[in-house]
Amino acid sequence: MDRLILRLPSKRLSVILVILVAFGILFVKALSEGWFTPREPLDLSSEPTLLFFNRSKGCECVLVVYQAAERQIAAWPKADYSGANLIRIDLDHRPDVGRQFNIIRVPAMLLVDSNGQVIYQQTEAVSDKSPLVLVKFEQAIKDYANEK
């Protein structure tokens, strides 16, 4: 009888410990997913604005394309898209912005005005090594500047 009484508290303690560990894991996952990060609205005040949508997570096959797009943007000289503000958006952390602009696949890039109206967009990857056609965005920026 004494053994039964001694085992009950340790079982309760084990259950409580398992529950605490489960909540700890959920909390760490919530932090890494950005659940507690404030969702600030996009600053589209400087027009036109380039919105570059990408992801940081996925299988190895799509990570190749995501990283190639990141390299393309990093190597893109600022002078080539002068007059446009470039905002990087990770859909893993900001799915709300993806829904706002109806972005389903990445990498994708939009050229928008200060009202968020799309001027030019590319929502399909052209190739795995060079998914974005940046010269078309350069031309769209020039055309938009000439219209204003």
Image (cartoon, helix red, strand yellow):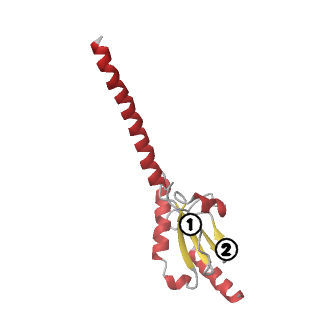
Measured as percent of width and height from the top left, residue 134 is found at 56, 75
Give me the residue at 41% from left, 43% from top: 25
- Tell me the amino acid under the disc marked 1: Glu
Quadrant, the N terminus: top left
- Up-down: is 59 above or below 3? below
Residue toward you, 102 or 66:
102
Residue 32, given in percent of the width and then of the height, sits at 44, 54
Mark 1–mark 2 Cα distance, whole angstroms, equals 24 Å
Q: Quadrant of the C terminus?
A: bottom right
Q: Amino acid at mark 2?
A: Tyr
Please, is residue 24 above or below residue 9 in the view? Answer: below
Instruction: Find residue 87 and report its image quarter.
Output: bottom right
Name which of mark 1 and mark 2 comes first in the sequence: 1
Q: Secondary structure at mark 2?
A: strand
Residue at 50% in and 82% down: 78
In the picture as drawn, the residue positioned furthest to the top comes out as: 1
Residue that carries the numbered disc 1 in the rendered image: 40
Residue 101's image quarter?
Answer: bottom right
Residue highlighted by disc 2: 120
Instruction: Give coordinates of residue 18: x percent, y percent.
Output: 38, 34
The residue shown at (50%, 59%) is: 37
Disc 1 is placed on an element classified as loop
Few, some or many residues within 10 Å of mark 2 (<14, 14–19, 20+)? some
